[in-house]
Image: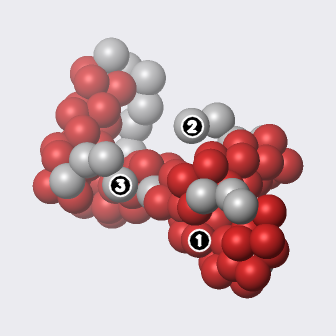
């Protein structure tokens, strides 16, 4: 994740505060809504971390083929990551 968790919590509070102030949302349980918003934001910011982990697992399984083809880990990582992003229709 690119942001510290403390900053994500701060962003969640600020987003909710601004939406409330603008009259765009209303809620009865501010702590609960803030926690849900935080969890959603952490999950969204962690998408790239999960993709990177999946790429590493794939490359570990195909290490012998990479050696045969003479591909470096970095080159293969970029190719596989692009492919997974495209397949899963993720925007990074």
Q: CA distance from mark 3 to mark 1?
A: 16 Å
Q: Which residue is mark 2?
A: 92
- The color scheme shown is secondary structure
Whichever of labels 3 and 1 marks the residue nearer the N terminus, that label is: 3
Q: Which residue is mark 1?
A: 56
> Split into 4 quadrants, where in the image is the C terminus?
top right
Q: Is residue 47 left or right of residue 45?
A: right
Whichever of labels 2 and 3 marks the residue nearer the N terminus, that label is: 3
Residue at 48% x, 60% y: name it: 49
Q: Is residue 49 visible?
A: yes
The 10 Å Cα crowd at callout 2, few under 14, some 14 to 19, many 20 or more, is: few
Residue 17: assigned label: none
Q: Is residue 29 visible?
A: no
Q: CA distance from mark 2 to mark 3?
A: 12 Å
The 10 Å Cα crowd at callout 3, few under 14, some 14 to 19, many 20 or more, is: few
Q: Could you say whether the residue bearing mark 3 is in a helix, strand or loop?
A: loop
Q: Position of residue 84 (x, y in %)?
A: 75, 53
Q: Position of residue 7 (x, y in %)?
A: 17, 46
Q: Could you say whether the residue bearing mark 2 is in a helix, strand or loop?
A: loop
Q: CA distance from mark 1 to mark 2?
A: 18 Å
Residue 1: assigned label: 3
Q: Is residue 6 left or right of residue 46?
A: left
Figure quadrant of residue 89:
top right
Q: Nearer the viewer, residue 11 or 47?
A: 47
Q: Is residue 77 left or right of residue 33?
A: right
Residue at 35% x, 54% y: name it: 1
Q: Position of residue 86 (x, y in %)?
A: 80, 42
Q: Nearer the viewer, residue 22 or 76?
A: 76
Residue at 79% x, 63% y: name it: 69
């Amino acid at each position: 994740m690119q942001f510290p968790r403390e900053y994500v919590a701060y962003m969640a509070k600020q987003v909710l505060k601004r939406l409330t102030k603008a009259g765009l949302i209303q809620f009865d349980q501010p702590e609960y809504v803030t926690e849900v918003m935080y969890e959603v934001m952490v999950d969204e910011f962690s998408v790239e971390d999960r993709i990177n982990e999946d790429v590493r697992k794939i490359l570990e399984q195909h290490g012998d083929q990479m050696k045969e083809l003479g591909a470096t880990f970095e080159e293969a990582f970029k190719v596989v990551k692009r492919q997974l992003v495209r397949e899963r229709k993720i925007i990074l």
